[in-house]
Image (cartoon, helix red, strand yellow):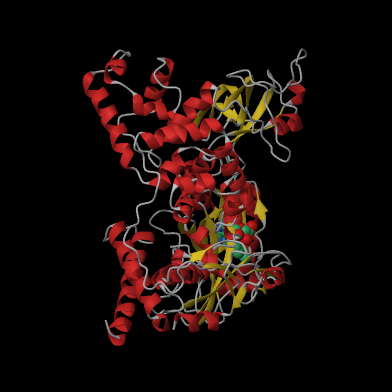
Amino acid sequence: MDVFQAQERIVELSELIRKHNHAYYMSDTPEISDYEFDQLLEELQKLENEFPQFAEENSPTKRVGGAITKKFETVVHRYPMLSLSNSYNREELIDFDQRVQKLAGKKVEYTCELKYDGVAIGIQYKNGQLHRAVTRGDGSKGDDITENVKTIRSVPLKLAGDYPDDFEIRGEIFYPLSVFKALNESREDIGEDRLANPRNAASGTLKMQDSKVVASRKLDCYLYYVLGEILPFKSHEENLSAATSWGFKVPKKSEKLFATYQSIEEIFEFIDYWSSGRNKLNFEIDGIVIKVNDYYLQEELGYTAKSPRWAIAYKFKAEQVETRLNEITYQVGRTGAITPVANLEPILLAGTTVKRASLHNADQIAKLDIREGDLVQVEKGGEIIPKVVGVNLSQRPPNSQPTEYISQCPECATELIRVEGEAKHYCPNETGCPTQIKGKMTHFISRKAMDIDGLGEETIEQLFEGGLIQNYADLYTLQEQDVLKLDRMAQKSVSNLLQGIENSKQIPFERVLFALGIRYVGETVSKKLAKHFKNMNAILNASLEEMTAVDEIGEKIAESLYFFLQKEEHRELINRLKSYGLQFEIVETESTQVSTIFEGKTFVVSGVFENYSRNELKKTIEDYGGKNVGSISKKTDYLVAGYKMGPAKKEKAESLGVTILSEQEFGDMLD
Ligand code: IVH
């Protein structure tokens, strides 16, 4: 492909991807499969790597992330980000309406919207390109989180249609509840604590330094407010509907996420509709926002120091009920983490019957002084699992006893341990505690790990109780005649099960590594480790320092991995799995390597670069045969130093005699 063809194809692909992105994320009418979409994106990425001069500043490949923000710059808002005055009852809304009508001297049109419970964002667009995205901060200045916001698929990078040259749009970034749930499940799966609620989680994600991680998190965003000197229309509704045509995800009238009304009664109906309907939404809301539609009237009403006089929020009360706490029980997770559970007198809350609620950990129980027999307040916020938020002390039974947290594992009676700085207690009996054993096996066979067809949690339980398996390696020694002896085991299902186990021997190394169930070694970490070490022997022989040196493997993960592999019983399990024919090395797929000039050389990439994102740089190093590591040691050959690199790194490189390359020098080496 010559230069001109490349340029043409880059433009063509960018447009095509934008169109499909819009169809998928905004209109919900995808025209091609995810696979085809990824193929287009990959083709574009390849061309941009080869012809970086044609890569657009806001190319769709930016969605994949890669840029690292070490420190988020503080930016002064062009228009302060105000809050809304809140109301909790209808009288206050009636007062608001009367004040507004008095000033207008006529019937007023209002818009009604949902009050999204996420992270407020202001995004500036210049000449149709996303220029900058800033958090609310203290209202007058916030943090520049542009690189992270660019990875959110429902935020357009480049606008369509007849947009103003320079304007800002505001909205709210949030985790769809389904995504939040999956995120927590995968965290729990590797022994991390669950995140408390979607809003805090979204806020934390947006402050991550590596935009690639943000890109993988599937945040979403609704935009609800257009600001600028020159806007096409003089009403809120018209500008929002114009924003839809520019490519923004704006709450739709057709889905009743937006409405215009002239009477307070209709507004009350909207509130009633959503106060019961909000449970069905895939995101959190905490109220309804009512705004004066007409901009002239908005101007006349003006602002107080904190909020506009032309808008008001009606806040829903957190959905809370009081019920009896019958018993506190304790659950043991796959990694041995103990979770106290409140067993409640069943009660209806936010559309579902609640029987159990999480009590989190010992500190939480002590802080609220929660006791069996208490009347407790249960709340269902963003957390999918309801939680106990308080105790009705006035109703405490006279014979009530303070809760004594368990000191032994409820499943195997082993003395529990609590590592300093961690909230949870753990059962250390990894290889003897039945719940942990079964949990580890269930993780091993799960879809993202060994994906063994015909085998589920119940069968694992049955095989374990029947004495046929003690650990996941035993799965590979199962004999048909033994399994057939178990209850409800027909010939067909046993054949399926054994075939599924046989097939799992083809599962690639990185998933086998994930399946081992090492704390903090999740899917992504497993991939990184497999890619770096290439086979299990290299990991088994690696020192703690060598593990920490792997790109993006921190101390916590490295320690967990290292000490897991130090244990004789784990080594034996791994040896057995090897002998049964599981994959313990990566199969090199077609390499994108273009040259071997960096063969055997080790690189550390640090700082921010002009022509590359950090990930592009790392990929280039690998394409030329080199290896990336996370920290500088005497084995490092080169430090590629961008601007904003910390002085400590530079000093360390100098003292160890590591060659420091500027971006320019690195480029020269490639040439
Ligand atoms: S309009 C000057 N509309 O609530 C008014 N805000 O308490 C600008 N929010 O900072 C805000 N949903 O983060 C507006 N439909 C909505 C909203 C909304 C949520 C948030 C926003 C704002 C806060 C005010």
Q: Which residue lies furthest to the left in this view?
A: 492
The x and y percentages for residue 195 are 59, 44
Q: Quadrant of ligand 1?
A: bottom right
User: Which quadrant is the C terminus positioned in?
Assistant: bottom left
User: Which quadrant is the N terminus positioned in?
Assistant: bottom left
> Residue 640 falls in which quadrant of the image?
bottom right
Q: Is 210 located above or below residue 496 in the figure?
A: below
> Residue 122 falls in which quadrant of the image?
bottom right
| Residue sitting nearer the eye, 321 or 41 | 41
The residue lying at 24 percent from left, 18 percent from top is 490
548 relative to 257 in the view: left or right: right
> Residue 670 falls in which quadrant of the image?
bottom left
Q: Is 627 located above or below residue 53 in the figure?
A: above
Q: Count the numbered circles shown.
A: 0
Q: Is 345 located above or below residue 388 in the figure?
A: above
Task: State whether residue 156 appears in this view.
Answer: no
Task: State whether residue 6 appears in this view.
Answer: yes
The residue lying at 36 percent from left, 65 percent from top is 22
The x and y percentages for residue 65 are 48, 65
The x and y percentages for residue 112 are 51, 57
The x and y percentages for residue 218 are 46, 55
| Residue sitting nearer the eye, 492 or 355 | 492
The residue lying at 52 percent from left, 59 percent from top is 214
Q: Residue furthest bottom?
A: 4
443 relative to 355 in the view: left or right: left
